Each structure stands twice: as structure tokens, then as C-alpha cells.
């Protein structure tokens, strides 16, 4: 298991905020969005979305582009390259 895979399991599959981060990642996988759009689409508080985007960005799971306000996020290439692991995490979280 490589370091990125371990990070995925820890950040998305094992931590308390993992289920919310999975929802954010899946929404971004569907289409790029900014924090405000994620708030509306996922029915989450703006500060909650900002918190999870910060964690996802710091751990290289999502990338942002554009100015700070309105920055659009997408899954990182590393996450796309490890998408099978993401699907395993999603499958396991659905069984809980």
C-alpha cells in the first residue's frame, strides 16, 4: 500500500469527518464546484465545507483554481489515479 492510499483511507475512510469528505469528493467528481455551490448542493454549512476543502487540499486530494473567493475545486490527478481505492472506501462506508 503506497503512502497516498494510506492517506486516502485515513482522511476518507477512518476519520470522523470522512463521510462528509467523501460526499464532497463525490460531488467534485461529478462536476467542478466552488465552496458555495457545494454548500447548496450538499446542504452543508459554508464553514464546514471550507474546513473539509482545506483538509482535502492540504492532503492533495483536490485542487483549486481561480481567485480565493469563488475558487473552483476538482479531484486531484493523484486521487483520479487512485479512484479504485476511493470506490472501496465508498463501498465500505455504505455498508456501515
Image (cartoon, helix red, strand yellow):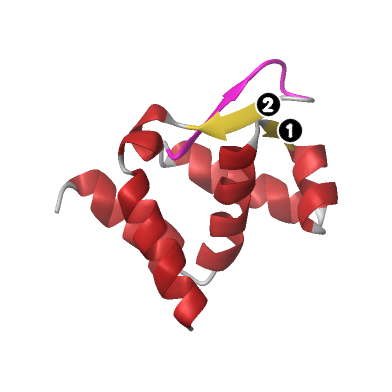
Left or right side of 39 for 24: left
Circle 2 residue: 72
Q: Residue furthest bottom?
A: 96
Which residue is drawn at the image coordinates 16% and 47% (left, top)?
2
Q: Is residue 75 magenta?
A: no
Closer to us: 79 or 52: 79
Left or right side of 60 for 74: right
Q: Which residues are magenta?
A: 61-69
Neighbour class for label 2 at 10 Å: few (<14), some, many (≥20)? Answer: some
Q: Decide: marks 2, 1 in contact (CB < 8 A)?
A: yes
Rendered image quadrant of residue 14: bottom left
Image coordinates for residue 67, horizontal then vertical, percent: 72, 16
Marks 2 and 1, Cα distance to the nearest angstrom?
Answer: 4 Å
Which residue is drawn at the image coordinates 40% and 57% (left, top)?
87
Tell me the tag on residue 20: none
Element at label 1: strand
Amino acid at each position: 500500500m503506497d503512502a497516498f492510499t494510506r492517506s486516502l483511507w485515513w482522511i476518507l475512510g477512518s476519520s470522523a469527518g470522512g463521510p462528509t469528505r467523501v460526499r464532497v469528493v463525490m460531488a467534485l467528481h461529478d462536476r467542478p464546484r466552488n465552496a458555495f455551490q457545494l454548500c447548496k448542493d450538499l446542504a452543508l454549512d459554508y464553514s464546514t465545507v471550507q474546513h473539509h476543502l482545506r483538509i482535502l487540499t492540504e492532503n492533495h486530494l483536490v485542487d483549486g483554481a481561480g481567485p480565493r473567493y469563488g475558487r473552483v475545486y476538482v479531484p486531484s490527478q493523484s486521487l483520479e489515479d487512485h479512484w479504485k481505492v476511493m470506490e472501496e472506501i465508498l463501498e465500505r462506508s455504505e455498508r456501515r
